[in-house]
């Protein structure tokens, strides 16, 4: 064989091998980013993701379709030469392209983040003033390289947390907003290169895990990624359980084809007022799981890898990570070799959903939290009592105590002036009726004399002058020259003063006592017609904030409490 023939054949082989490497590399990237979306949207249920990770061979071995007029590979084995070696094992493929530097500890923790960002929310979207996008899905993937297993720990978006380096009262999904820099006003901006928001989510998850886990890596995706994936793989056939609407788009119940926008609208519904879908985080999570199962079924049946270029473009600007392709390959190789449905643990740091701090929060079940940390990391940590349901209530009561005392004192001061003025007047004493006399028996009654009718002077229409600065009082008596307020009204004021004094003299209080004080103060204010500063507008500790109510506390705009202002909607 001539040298030129050998060179030409070698060049062809090199080009073919290069194309295979690129194809495998692209296939791996697509599987990786799809896996991230699947995880972020909570579809580990049913083992779909574990099977996809555990059997990437099918993805890599799927040939690209050959066009009708495609030119075949010009290389054919020479006489006496053996056939090309068999396809490389997927584990070897991933290992060869991998970077083992990520496998530097017994447990590797990776933060998976879903950001509620989409272009439609950039302006004039109710509830998102300031484009305050949040990390509405947060999970830690703990890969145990020593024991050959993995655990997924999910955190509810509304979890009451302390964001490291910030303090204040925040939901966990606001941790993304607290990682802003000087170029990024709100914490996440797709046009600003800043890994601070994602790092802050990682730090907050570390705090939730008691400091036993270091989270160095993250993957984050935005909402349009899901929409674009669906539009590429084709519409999804899905049985919608009830009619719903979202963003002035309306959908009927029943089996139907759903495009990317419809799927995104469906999995986003969480609050009431959007048709007949069940509301709340748990129901939304259930819908996400069911929908993602349908998407994965469609991807498997539609030959998705044929559309590799489109899939790659779909994630442009929607995937954020500090994990390199080579490091991801190493993780995938580990998953291929070690992971199965049986050794992927699922954990949720759930808790009680409560309306507290004038918002809806999830107050972590601390016993469950401690148990999860011990099962996953083998470490014992203390319960964080301040962030339990009881601890949150105590903190909220302390914050509200001064507000409630100030409002009640204003009501008492006002009413006391009225009563002091009223006490200067005499008590009302009714004139006794004359006792009728019985005429003697058999005594004729004299005929009535022609007595003229008495002249009745009509009452004066002039208003009664009261003390300066006092409002017109209710006329409970027959005349304004006597006391106007009854014993029952005075007893009502004494009861309010007793509640007020007890709270003022106590170092601690409770949500129940605060609610009792507020309701009694409003009752007294209504009885004595005190309306200053909207004092009669209630806002109980267990309510969301009521506009104009002096009983509410806008701590979330007070930088002495929350250094970074975040829109919790």
Image (tube, helix red, strand yellow):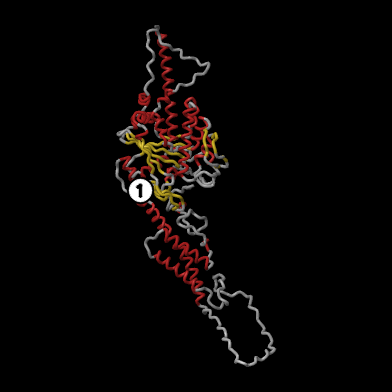
Q: Which of 538 and 470 lies nearest the eye of the viewer?
A: 538
- Could you tell me residue 402's position as x and y percent? 43, 60
Q: In the rendered view, would you say 417 is above or below 556?
A: below
Question: Tag 1, which secondary structure?
Answer: helix
Q: In the rendered view, would you say 249 is above or below 167?
A: above
Q: Which quarter of the image is occupied by the N terminus? A: top left
Does any portion of residue 246 appear in the rendered image?
A: no
Q: Is residue 432 left or right of residue 368?
A: right
- Could you tell me residue 63's position as x and y percent? 45, 21
Residue located at (43% from left, 44% from top)? 157
Residue located at (37% from left, 51% from top)? 388
Q: Which residue sits furthest front? A: 442
- Could you tell me residue 558's position as x and y percent? 45, 53
Mark 1, Cα crowd under 10 Å, few <14 / some 14-19 / many 20+, is: some
Q: In the rendered view, would you say 428 is above or below 96?
A: below
Q: Is residue 138 left or right of residue 272?
A: left
């Amino acid at each position: 064989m001539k040298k030129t023939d050998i060179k030409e054949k070698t060049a062809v082989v090199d080009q073919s091998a290069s194309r295979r490497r690129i194809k495998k590399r692209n296939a791996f990237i697509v599987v990786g980013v799809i896996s991230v979306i699947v995880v972020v949207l909570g579809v580990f249920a049913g083992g779909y993701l574990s099977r996809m990770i555990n059997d990437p061979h099918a993805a890599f071995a799927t040939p690209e379709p050959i066009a009708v007029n495609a030119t075949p590979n010009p290389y054919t084995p020479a006489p006496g030469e053996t056939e090309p070696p068999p396809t490389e094992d997927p584990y070897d493929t991933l290992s060869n392209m991998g970077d083992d530097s990520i496998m530097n500890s017994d447990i590797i923790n990776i933060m998976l983040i879903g950001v509620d960002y989409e272009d439609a929310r950039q302006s004039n979207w109710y509830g998102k003033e300031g484009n305050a996008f949040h990390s509405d899905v947060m999970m830690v993937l703990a890969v145990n390289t020593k024991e050959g297993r993995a655990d997924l720990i999910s955190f509810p978006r509304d979890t009451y947390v302390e964001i490291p380096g910030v303090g204040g009262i925040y939901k966990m999904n606001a941790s993304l907003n607290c990682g802003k820099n000087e170029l990024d006003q709100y914490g996440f901006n797709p046009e600003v290169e800043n890994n601070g928001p994602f790092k802050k989510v990682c730090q907050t998850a570390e705090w939730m895990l008691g400091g036993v886990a270091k989270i160095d890596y993250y993957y984050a995706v935005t909402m349009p990624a899901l929409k674009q994936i669906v539009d590429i793989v084709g519409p999804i056939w899905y049985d919608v359980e009830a009619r719903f609407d979202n963003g002035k788009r309306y959908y009927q119940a029943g089996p139907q084809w759903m495009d990317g926008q419809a799927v995104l609208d469906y999995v986003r519904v969480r609050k009431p007022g959007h048709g007949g879908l069940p509301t709340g985080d748990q129901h939304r999570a259930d819908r996400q799981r069911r929908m993602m199962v349908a998407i994965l079924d469609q991807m498997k049946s539609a030959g998705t890898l044929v559309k590799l270029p489109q899939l790659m473009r779909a994630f442009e600007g929607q995937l954020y990570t500090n994990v390199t392709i080579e490091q991801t390959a190493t993780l995938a190789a580990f998953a291929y070799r070690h992971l199965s449905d049986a050794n992927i643990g699922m954990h949720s740091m759930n808790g009680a959903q409560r309306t507290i701090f004038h918002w809806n929060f999830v107050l972590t079940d601390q016993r469950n939290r401690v148990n999860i940390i011990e099962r996953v990391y083998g470490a014992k940590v203390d319960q964080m009592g301040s962030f339990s349901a009881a601890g949150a209530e105590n903190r909220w009561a302390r914050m509200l105590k001064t507000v409630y005392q100030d409002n009640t004192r204003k009501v008492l001061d006002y009413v006391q002036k009225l009563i002091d003025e009223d006490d200067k007047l005499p008590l009302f004493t009714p004139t006794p009726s004359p006792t009728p006399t019985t005429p003697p028996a058999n005594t004729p009654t004299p005929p009535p004399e022609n007595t003229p009718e008495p002249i009745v002077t009509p009452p004066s229409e002039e208003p009664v002058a009261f003390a300066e600065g006092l409002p017109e009082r209710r006329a409970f008596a027959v005349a304004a020259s006597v006391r106007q307020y009854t014993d029952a009204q005075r007893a009502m004021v004494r009861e309010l003063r007793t509640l007020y004094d007890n709270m003022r003299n106590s170092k601690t209080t409770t949500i129940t006592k605060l609610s009792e004080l507020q309701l009694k103060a409003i009752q007294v204010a209504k009885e004595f017609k005190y309306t200053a500063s909207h004092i009669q507008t209630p806002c109980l500790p267990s309510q969301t904030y009521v506009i104009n109510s002096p009983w509410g506390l806008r701590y979330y705009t007070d930088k002495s409490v929350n250094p970074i202002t975040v829109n919790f909607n």
